[in-house]
């Protein structure tokens, strides 16, 4: 697809009686432990299913052709942040076990506890279960890669896809994923973060503007693909 | 900047009496020898000046801050086509000398001869002269980098900037630069090439559509930059 999926509507996360605690606080109510980490090749089956769900949401399954093999052969070829990079969002009803393997590669996983008013049932838990941390499931992802501003003379990030599975929406997790990318850009001294949104998706636009984004009214995307692209095979 | 500069209007290159000859033909009239090659760090002074001219053309000099040092420190860090890549367009009134150094890195320079009706005066020839091939000057460039389509499960190219100096416009050189990127995408098995255009720039849109591009009407660019970006420094 060409663009970040519409995010969950800008409903704020349900506030817990004591406010949103940080990771060291004792959770109250129904805690949802969430973690953002760099995806690895082992996550490809989950990522492929998440992308497929995004295609269904956008009614674009006719454009969806990516197999696990396609993704495995094109992703994870470069160190994180230098090329196509995926942050995977996992959630669990129990705290995540510490995993020092996840702390490498210039990125420390981000953990948050979200206190829900009600317990949450994930009808797809079996499909998206993490084989290592038994209770954790993949709940969403963001795929991004470096772009470049010649005017700034520095790189930025372009967010291609942002997706959270249906039962985990409206809890601030989409914002958490996008914020992780923007924070990483700041940390690396990059100049901007960009993505695209459909002009009729007013909820998404409001959500993004509240996060500090400007929506540029005049620019349009041009794309050469399919047979029109293939026609250039012998053009030069 | 955010986008490919408006290309030269879609005026076809002046046709020579015998049509556009290939590089082996004897030129007639006033031949302009043109060559597209991968830029190197030695080209940064010319590239910086070309970007500045683009900012003037777009009346965006207030957004232009890139120094030669910025560009040198951020470009040429990866092999060509794997990250930010620049094709430099050079022109000369004499044939280019063969340079085997330019044939490395998965790209063979593209040469064309354009037959002009009149001889051409380049008022900035001294500024943009190539120190090695004495008569050749830098006339334009295209900066592009890989992007990724999760639906296709494969990479593409995003064209950030396309620029041809004023005295060389309307001769098919912008089309030659963009075609070189599209051809490279096909050669690498990539799925698409994208860039952006201003919605009021009807000449540019017509030019791109004639090249096989679709202009996507509904997508809008979102951007976080400047203080709004900086606000995320301690967000995570």
Image: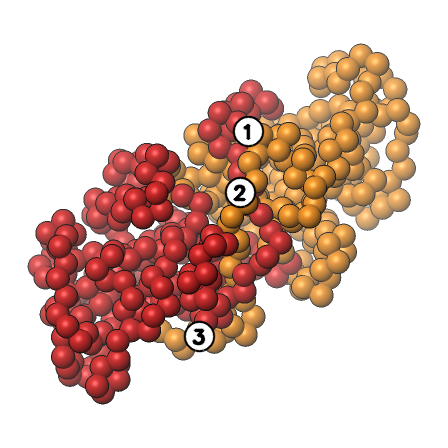
Chain colours: A red, B orange
For residue B75, side relative to residue B118 (left or right): left
For residue A61, side relative to residue B21 (left or right): left
**Which badge, 3 or 2, comes first in the chain's sequence?**
2
**Residue bearing the label numbered 1:** B183
For residue B169, side relative to residue B30 (left or right): left
Near mark 3 (Cα within 10 A), the count class, few <14, some 14-19 or many ≥20, is some
Residue B69: x %, y % from top left: 64, 60
Residue at position x 55%, y 29% from top? B183
For residue A143, side relative to residue B124 (left or right): left
Residue A28: x %, y % from top left: 15, 82
Residue at position x 50%, y 54% from top? A199
**Residue bearing the label numbered 2:** B216
Residue B202: x %, y % from top left: 70, 41
Q: For numbered disc 1, what is the local secondary structure?
A: helix
Mark pair 1, 2: CA separation = 22 Å
**The N terminus of chain B sits in image quarter:** bottom right
| Residue A63 against residue A16 in the figure, above or below | above
Marker disc for residue B233: 3
Quarter of the view holding residue A113: bottom left
Q: For numbered disc 3, what is the local secondary structure?
A: loop
Note whether residue A44 is visible. Answer: no
Note whether residue B145 is visible. Answer: yes
């Amino acid at each position: 697809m060409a663009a970040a999926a519409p995010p969950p509507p800008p409903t704020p996360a349900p506030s817990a009686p004591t406010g949103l605690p940080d990771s060291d606080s004792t959770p109250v109510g129904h805690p949802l432990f969430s973690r953002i980490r760099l995806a690895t090749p082992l996550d490809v089956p989950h990522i492929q299913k998440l992308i497929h769900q995004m295609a269904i949401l956008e009614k674009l399954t006719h454009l969806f052709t990516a197999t696990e093999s396609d993704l495995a052969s094109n992703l994870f070829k470069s160190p994180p942040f230098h090329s196509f990079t995926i942050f995977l969002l996992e959630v669990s009803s129990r705290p995540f076990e510490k995993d020092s393997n996840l702390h490498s590669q210039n990125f420390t996983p981000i953990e948050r506890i979200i206190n829900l008013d009600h317990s949450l049932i994930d009808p797809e838990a079996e499909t998206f279960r993490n084989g290592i941390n038994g209770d954790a499931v993949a709940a969403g992802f963001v795929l991004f890669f470096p772009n470049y501003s010649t005017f700034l003379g520095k790189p930025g990030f372009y967010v291609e896809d942002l997706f959270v599975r249906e039962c985990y929406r409206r809890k601030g997790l989409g914002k958490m994923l996008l914020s992780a990318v923007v924070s990483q850009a700041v940390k690396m001294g990059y100049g901007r973060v960009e993505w695209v949104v459909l002009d009729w998706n007013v909820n998404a636009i409001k959500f993004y503007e509240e996060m500090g984004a400007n929506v540029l009214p005049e620019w349009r995307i041009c794309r050469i693909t399919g047979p029109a692209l293939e026609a250039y095979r012998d053009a030069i």
